[in-house]
Amino acid sequence: MAISKRNLIFLGAPGSGKGTMAAALREVEPLAHISTGDLLRDEIKRDTALGREAAGIMKAGGLVSDDIVCGMVRNRLAQPDCANGFILDGFPRTIAQAEKLTEVLAELNKKLDAVVNIVVEDEVILTRLTSRLSCRGCSEIYNKISKKPKVEGVCDVCGGELYQRPDDSLETAQQRLAVFYKNTQPLIDYYRERGLLVDIDKEEVPEKLEQLLAALA
Ligand code: ADP
Ligand code: ZN
Protein backbone atom coordinates (compact mmCIF):
# COMPACT_ATOMS: atom_id res chain seq x y z
CA MET A 1 0.00 0.00 0.00
CA ALA A 2 1.51 3.29 -1.06
CA ILE A 3 1.17 6.32 1.19
CA SER A 4 0.49 9.83 -0.05
CA LYS A 5 1.56 11.69 3.12
CA ARG A 6 5.34 11.39 3.03
CA ASN A 7 6.81 14.42 4.79
CA LEU A 8 6.42 13.48 8.42
CA ILE A 9 7.26 14.34 12.00
CA PHE A 10 7.19 11.60 14.63
CA LEU A 11 6.28 13.08 17.98
CA GLY A 12 6.27 11.19 21.26
CA ALA A 13 7.92 10.94 24.66
CA PRO A 14 11.44 9.54 24.89
CA GLY A 15 11.00 5.77 24.80
CA SER A 16 7.61 5.97 23.10
CA GLY A 17 9.02 3.99 20.20
CA LYS A 18 9.52 6.71 17.58
CA GLY A 19 12.68 5.06 16.29
CA THR A 20 11.08 1.63 16.22
CA MET A 21 8.04 2.92 14.31
CA ALA A 22 10.28 4.82 11.90
CA ALA A 23 12.16 1.60 11.15
CA ALA A 24 8.88 -0.31 10.68
CA LEU A 25 7.51 2.30 8.28
CA ARG A 26 10.75 2.37 6.31
CA GLU A 27 10.48 -1.35 5.64
CA VAL A 28 7.39 -0.49 3.56
CA GLU A 29 8.24 3.01 2.34
CA PRO A 30 11.76 4.29 1.52
CA LEU A 31 11.55 7.55 3.50
CA ALA A 32 14.70 9.30 4.73
CA HIS A 33 15.06 8.89 8.51
CA ILE A 34 16.27 12.01 10.30
CA SER A 35 16.90 11.41 13.99
CA THR A 36 18.43 14.47 15.64
CA GLY A 37 19.53 12.23 18.54
CA ASP A 38 21.44 9.97 16.10
CA LEU A 39 22.91 12.99 14.29
CA LEU A 40 24.11 14.42 17.63
CA ARG A 41 25.52 11.08 18.81
CA ASP A 42 27.39 10.87 15.51
CA GLU A 43 28.94 14.31 16.14
CA ILE A 44 30.00 13.09 19.61
CA LYS A 45 31.50 9.90 18.17
CA ARG A 46 33.50 11.96 15.66
CA ASP A 47 34.53 14.32 18.47
CA THR A 48 33.58 17.47 16.52
CA ALA A 49 33.25 20.90 18.16
CA LEU A 50 29.48 20.56 17.89
CA GLY A 51 29.63 17.10 19.47
CA ARG A 52 31.71 18.36 22.37
CA GLU A 53 29.20 21.13 22.97
CA ALA A 54 26.23 18.75 22.90
CA ALA A 55 27.67 15.85 24.93
CA GLY A 56 27.29 17.31 28.41
CA ILE A 57 23.77 18.57 27.78
CA MET A 58 22.67 15.19 26.42
CA LYS A 59 24.24 13.32 29.31
CA ALA A 60 22.22 15.46 31.72
CA GLY A 61 19.00 14.90 29.76
CA GLY A 62 18.66 18.56 28.71
CA LEU A 63 17.93 20.03 25.28
CA VAL A 64 20.72 20.96 22.88
CA SER A 65 20.35 24.54 21.60
CA ASP A 66 17.75 25.26 18.94
CA ASP A 67 20.44 26.79 16.70
CA ILE A 68 22.53 23.63 16.64
CA VAL A 69 19.71 21.20 15.98
CA CYS A 70 17.92 23.44 13.47
CA GLY A 71 21.17 23.85 11.51
CA MET A 72 21.70 20.09 11.43
CA VAL A 73 18.14 19.43 10.30
CA ARG A 74 18.33 22.08 7.59
CA ASN A 75 21.45 20.48 6.09
CA ARG A 76 19.93 17.04 6.29
CA LEU A 77 16.61 18.05 4.68
CA ALA A 78 18.49 19.55 1.74
CA GLN A 79 20.00 16.13 0.87
CA PRO A 80 18.60 14.48 -2.27
CA ASP A 81 17.28 11.39 -0.45
CA CYS A 82 14.70 13.60 1.32
CA ALA A 83 12.99 14.43 -1.99
CA ASN A 84 10.88 11.29 -1.76
CA GLY A 85 9.73 11.92 1.80
CA PHE A 86 11.24 12.04 5.27
CA ILE A 87 10.61 11.17 8.90
CA LEU A 88 11.78 13.74 11.43
CA ASP A 89 12.35 11.68 14.58
CA GLY A 90 12.94 13.69 17.75
CA PHE A 91 12.66 17.06 16.02
CA PRO A 92 11.09 19.54 16.63
CA ARG A 93 11.15 19.37 20.41
CA THR A 94 10.20 22.98 21.17
CA ILE A 95 7.76 25.49 19.69
CA ALA A 96 10.75 27.58 18.55
CA GLN A 97 12.11 24.59 16.62
CA ALA A 98 8.69 24.01 15.07
CA GLU A 99 8.57 27.60 13.85
CA LYS A 100 12.09 27.36 12.47
CA LEU A 101 11.13 24.14 10.70
CA THR A 102 8.25 25.90 8.95
CA GLU A 103 10.73 28.47 7.60
CA VAL A 104 13.26 25.86 6.53
CA LEU A 105 10.64 23.78 4.72
CA ALA A 106 9.35 26.87 2.89
CA GLU A 107 12.91 27.71 1.80
CA LEU A 108 13.39 24.18 0.49
CA ASN A 109 9.99 24.20 -1.22
CA LYS A 110 8.66 21.39 0.91
CA LYS A 111 5.61 21.05 3.07
CA LEU A 112 4.75 19.00 6.09
CA ASP A 113 2.07 16.35 5.45
CA ALA A 114 1.42 14.92 8.92
CA VAL A 115 2.63 14.86 12.51
CA VAL A 116 2.44 11.38 13.98
CA ASN A 117 1.74 11.41 17.70
CA ILE A 118 2.83 8.15 19.29
CA VAL A 119 0.69 7.76 22.39
CA VAL A 120 2.13 5.65 25.23
CA GLU A 121 1.20 5.37 28.89
CA ASP A 122 3.63 7.06 31.29
CA GLU A 123 4.31 3.95 33.37
CA VAL A 124 5.53 2.00 30.36
CA ILE A 125 8.04 4.63 29.36
CA LEU A 126 10.53 4.60 32.23
CA THR A 127 10.77 0.81 32.28
CA ARG A 128 11.32 0.85 28.56
CA LEU A 129 14.00 3.54 28.58
CA THR A 130 16.04 1.99 31.37
CA SER A 131 15.99 -1.45 29.74
CA ARG A 132 16.85 -0.16 26.27
CA LEU A 133 20.00 -1.25 24.44
CA SER A 134 21.33 0.49 21.33
CA CYS A 135 23.76 -0.68 18.65
CA ARG A 136 27.00 1.28 18.32
CA GLY A 137 27.19 0.30 14.66
CA CYS A 138 23.78 0.91 13.11
CA SER A 139 21.64 2.47 15.92
CA GLU A 140 19.21 -0.49 15.91
CA ILE A 141 17.25 -0.57 19.15
CA TYR A 142 16.84 -3.60 21.46
CA ASN A 143 15.35 -4.12 24.88
CA LYS A 144 16.71 -6.27 27.75
CA ILE A 145 13.16 -7.46 28.50
CA SER A 146 11.02 -7.34 25.38
CA LYS A 147 13.36 -7.38 22.39
CA LYS A 148 16.51 -9.32 23.21
CA PRO A 149 19.13 -9.79 20.50
CA LYS A 150 19.77 -13.38 19.35
CA VAL A 151 23.27 -13.23 20.89
CA GLU A 152 23.68 -11.22 24.09
CA GLY A 153 25.44 -7.91 23.54
CA VAL A 154 25.58 -8.30 19.75
CA CYS A 155 23.41 -6.59 17.10
CA ASP A 156 21.33 -9.01 14.97
CA VAL A 157 21.51 -6.63 12.02
CA CYS A 158 25.16 -5.62 11.77
CA GLY A 159 27.05 -7.57 14.45
CA GLY A 160 27.90 -4.32 16.25
CA GLU A 161 28.27 -3.94 20.01
CA LEU A 162 25.13 -3.20 22.05
CA TYR A 163 25.36 -0.65 24.86
CA GLN A 164 23.16 1.30 27.23
CA ARG A 165 23.10 4.96 26.25
CA PRO A 166 24.46 7.07 29.11
CA ASP A 167 21.22 9.07 29.11
CA ASP A 168 19.13 5.91 29.59
CA SER A 169 20.09 5.73 33.28
CA LEU A 170 17.07 6.07 35.59
CA GLU A 171 18.01 9.56 36.76
CA THR A 172 18.55 10.99 33.28
CA ALA A 173 15.54 9.20 31.86
CA GLN A 174 13.35 10.91 34.49
CA GLN A 175 14.90 14.23 33.59
CA ARG A 176 14.27 13.67 29.86
CA LEU A 177 10.66 12.84 30.58
CA ALA A 178 10.25 16.05 32.58
CA VAL A 179 11.80 18.02 29.69
CA PHE A 180 9.40 16.32 27.29
CA TYR A 181 6.33 17.33 29.31
CA LYS A 182 7.50 20.89 29.67
CA ASN A 183 8.91 21.66 26.22
CA THR A 184 7.68 19.10 23.72
CA GLN A 185 4.16 18.17 24.79
CA PRO A 186 2.83 21.64 23.82
CA LEU A 187 3.68 20.69 20.21
CA ILE A 188 0.85 18.15 20.27
CA ASP A 189 -1.75 20.92 20.56
CA TYR A 190 0.26 23.17 18.26
CA TYR A 191 0.05 20.67 15.40
CA ARG A 192 -3.48 19.51 16.30
CA GLU A 193 -4.66 23.11 15.87
CA ARG A 194 -3.01 23.14 12.44
CA GLY A 195 -4.89 20.00 11.43
CA LEU A 196 -1.75 17.92 11.01
CA LEU A 197 -1.89 15.59 13.99
CA VAL A 198 -2.42 11.84 13.63
CA ASP A 199 -2.73 9.88 16.89
CA ILE A 200 -1.29 6.39 16.92
CA ASP A 201 -2.57 4.60 20.00
CA LYS A 202 -2.52 0.89 19.19
CA GLU A 203 -0.33 -1.18 21.52
CA GLU A 204 1.64 -3.64 19.43
CA VAL A 205 3.95 -2.65 16.60
CA PRO A 206 2.12 -4.51 13.78
CA GLU A 207 -1.23 -2.86 14.67
CA LYS A 208 0.50 0.49 15.11
CA LEU A 209 1.98 0.19 11.63
CA GLU A 210 -1.40 -0.72 10.16
CA GLN A 211 -3.02 2.30 11.85
CA LEU A 212 -0.17 4.51 10.64
CA LEU A 213 -0.35 3.34 7.01
CA ALA A 214 -4.11 3.91 6.98
CA ALA A 215 -3.68 7.44 8.34
CA LEU A 216 -1.01 8.31 5.77
CA ALA A 217 -2.81 6.77 2.77
P1 ADP B 1 14.85 10.01 22.96
O1 ADP B 1 13.78 10.40 21.99
O2 ADP B 1 14.85 8.58 23.32
O3 ADP B 1 14.93 10.91 24.16
P2 ADP B 1 16.92 11.08 21.16
O4 ADP B 1 17.94 10.20 20.57
O5 ADP B 1 15.86 11.63 20.28
O6 ADP B 1 16.28 10.25 22.35
O7 ADP B 1 17.62 12.33 21.90
C1 ADP B 1 18.66 12.15 22.81
C2 ADP B 1 19.11 13.51 23.33
O8 ADP B 1 19.61 14.30 22.26
C3 ADP B 1 18.02 14.36 23.96
O9 ADP B 1 17.80 14.04 25.33
C4 ADP B 1 18.59 15.77 23.77
O10 ADP B 1 19.58 16.05 24.73
C5 ADP B 1 19.26 15.69 22.41
N1 ADP B 1 18.33 16.08 21.32
C6 ADP B 1 17.84 15.27 20.34
N2 ADP B 1 17.01 15.95 19.52
C7 ADP B 1 16.95 17.21 19.99
C8 ADP B 1 16.23 18.40 19.61
N3 ADP B 1 15.39 18.39 18.56
N4 ADP B 1 16.44 19.52 20.35
C9 ADP B 1 17.26 19.53 21.40
N5 ADP B 1 17.95 18.46 21.83
C10 ADP B 1 17.81 17.30 21.14
ZN1 ZN C 1 23.76 -2.82 14.47
Image (cartoon, rainbow, N blue to C red):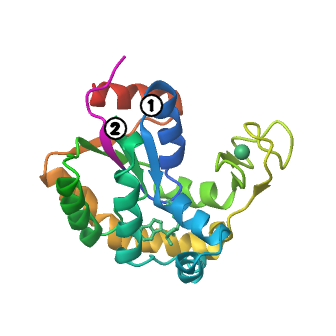
| Amino acid bearing label 2 | Gly
Return the x and y of residue 74 as percentages of the image width and height.
34, 60
**Residue 33 spot, x, y in % from top left:** 46, 45
Observer-nearest of 67 and 59: 67
Residue 151 lies in quadrant = top right
Quarter assignment of residue 84: top left
Q: How many marks?
A: 2
Q: Is residue 78 visible?
A: yes
Residue 91 visible in the snapshot = no
- Judge: label 2 CB < 8 Å from ligand 1: no
Q: Quadrant of the N terminus?
A: top left
* The residue stretch that appears in magenta: 1-9
Q: Position of residue 2 (x, y in %)?
A: 34, 20
Q: Which of the two discs, 1 and 2, labels the residue nearer the N terminus?
A: 1
Q: Main secondary structure of the magenta part?
A: loop
Residue 7 among magenta residues: yes
Query: For residue 85, which numbered disc appears in the image?
Result: 2
Whether 195 is among the magenta residues is: no
Secondary structure of the residue carrying numbered label 2: loop
